[in-house]
Amino acid sequence: MLELVDLQIVRQQQPLIAPITASVAAGQILALMGPSGVGKSSLLAYLSGTLTPELEGRGKAVLNGNSLAHLPPEQRHLGLLQQHPLLFPHMTVAENLLFAMPKGGSNQQRYHTAQQHLQDIGLQGLEARLPEQLSGGQQARLALMRTLVAKPAALLLDEPFSKLDKTLRQDMRQLVKDAIEQAHIPAILVTHDEEDAQELASKIIQLQAI
Amino acid sequence: MYSSFNRTLYYLILGVIGLPLLTGLLGVVLPSFGYDPALGQVSFHLGHWQQLLQQPEFWSGLRLSLSTGVLATLLSYWFASSLIMVCFEKPWFTRLQSAITPILSIPHASITIGALFLLAPSGWLVRLISPWLSGFERPPNWITVQDPEGVALIIALVIKEMPYLMFAMGAALSQLQPQQTLQAARLLGYERLTAWHFTLLPQLFPLLRLPIFMVLAFNMTVVDVASIIGPNTPSTLAVTLLRWFNDPNLVLRGQASAAALVLASMVAVSILCWLLFYRLLNQLRHHFSTLGTRQSWLRYWTWFGASAAGLTLLMTLLSLLLLPIWAFTKRWRFPDAWPNRWTLDNLNRAGDRLISLTAESFSLAIASAFIGLLMALVLIEFERAKGRSRISVALLFSAVLLPQVTLLFGIQVGLLYFDWSGTWLSVLAVHVLYTLPYIYLTLKAPYLAFEQGYLEQANRLRFTPIRNYLTIKLALLKAPLAAALAIGFAVSMAQYLPTLLAGEGRINTLTTEAVARASSGDRKLVSVLAFAQAILPLICFMLATLIPRYWTRWRLAFRRSLCSN
């Protein structure tokens, strides 16, 4: 369960959006919609603890009973998926997954698990490739899988499909939806695409600029 | 537009760089095997090598060059990268970066002289803690500079090279996506510094190869810094072989040439070892970064390095501050923390000599910066049109990476052969050999990034290609052009060995004079020289940042004032 209370982004004491209050249950997706430049991405950056210093976030976010305020990003247990897949270019496909997997298990077991995850997203046999050798759709799937194997307690989706073409979009939507239900975690989707929101979200909030 | 004239000019410039390199190499290789027509020796033999290997000074010098050069490079890299990792993403990070940039323009010799006056037993550090803490009423009997193991030399090298590596890393970072990469790793649960070590540093290193090699080659072969603050019985190999080279006993020349070749091979081998070492380190890092450990002990290592980097920067600052302090000191007795009387007498005492030395330094620096800039423009413009630059890059990098002692011995042999040695023009030519590579490297990226569309559009509107090139392209590139000029100026100001060897002691600059007098004991006079040597490139650097920024505003204001009259 992820609860947002009076969440707001402020620039030089000027609020950018009307405060948001909502709660998202595990397995559900909340969509935040609005025109570009309204501060949607900044909201997710505030939630994940990576807001730029020029902006200030206000309000409270509680994940499974724990307040996220003042925690460094690495202790928030949030997964973030952006339109840029941000796969580490110097690591192979398998290494990108291994990097994200929690500690534990022998090297062989870990590698085996990584291989299975790759099979789930149709990337079997590409373990030793570098990310730049993958197609756009493959990169997007790998980025999603990398976020999931870290076992986040909630997922933040920042326009994750906007760089994909129409058919790929459809596939990725389904993949994301299934993954969130299976992982049974709350998710917040930020988008300006009506279709994304209609198909995925159980609840939609229109952001209003002030 | 790219006529055969341009092609000829291009290859002419390559020849102008290549010929001295070739002469330089031949001029050490041949004499080391006994062939030296200037001395009347025309038979090949291995006598000089046998002689060299029997010199205990050679072996101890070799060991010192290797240990001080490698250690200074490793420490500079460790400190610089640690400080960047710790301070990156802090709101004042950009201010820190712009604060260290001016240090790059200050010649090594000036900073080293400052460091000498800071670290010496009677230096500022001891004065600051005496007598209240240390109890010293007179300088202690310690060896804190010119120590036999070269610790002071390592410190002097680190306080100058660390800021340079920080600058290089800052520039390399801007080619990556540092913030996003760190965020991605941290959101996967990685502690900040661990995230740095696993994700950003491995991407950064390939971009840093050349700067690190330059630092490594420099540290192992530097003469001026080592002769000011390094050990002297025995000295580093570079200093020892310069002494042999200048020995009245001409037989030592062959031995010096052989040693110069050893020095160059040592640099090459060290670069290879560094690459192997890094490959090994990278393997380890790949292994550890796939285990899923979210917090690595590497972060303590980084914190330690960053603290040391902070101390290093403080020492750089103190060393530089000492120069104007000593330059304007009248009386500064030992345990006092501060001079008790100030004066302008030191400037007066230096007087005419100071003016002539400054004029010599300034004219060489200005001329070699402008010539270097023109040559770099021709090279880069031709390569932009042709899309390849292998030969010029290889030639320019060899000029930078080959030890100055090695190359300049050979060049001097060539200059003597043609009887050009000791002339202002030959000194200028050797300066250009060193200003050109740095100007080329600074200018290349911004020049190639220029949106060629502006120029093409201008030529469609009014076909005056040369005029448009000047008033559109170069005018838009005035900031990088000014920066490149300032760097060329600073490089020339810093040259010690080229002036000394090509000038045969007949051409004296602030640098040669300051280095020659560094250990004379006349701190006030030496500081005047070193301060002048430091302040000129600093002023040039400031002008290079200010003028392009306000140029258009000034031009328009000038126009308006003309119209209103």
Image (cartoon, coloured by chain):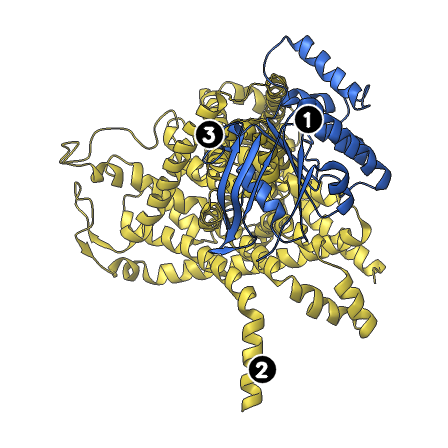
Chain colours: A blue, B yellow
Q: In the rendered image, is residue B99 in sight? A: yes
Q: Residues within 10 Å of mark 1 (few under 14, many from 20)?
A: many
Q: Amino acid at mark 1?
A: Arg
Q: Residue at x 14, y 36 (%)?
A: B131
Q: Amino acid at mark 2?
A: Arg
Question: Mark 2 against mark 1, which lies toward the viewer?
Answer: 1
B389 to the left or right of B551:
right
The image quarter in which residue B291 lies: top right
Task: Tell me the distance, in whole angstroms, between the alpha carbons under discs 2 and 3.
Answer: 53 Å
B461 to the left or right of A67:
right
B374 to the left or right of B425:
right
Q: Residue furthest right?
A: A167
Q: To which residue does mark 3 refer?
A: B75
Q: To which residue does mark 1 refer?
A: A146
Q: Secondary structure at mark 2?
A: helix
Q: Secondary structure at mark 1?
A: helix
Q: Amino acid at mark 3?
A: Leu
The relative height of residue B543 versus residue B395 in the rendered view (above or below) is below
B225 or B115, which is in the foreground? B115
Q: To which residue does mark 2 refer?
A: B559
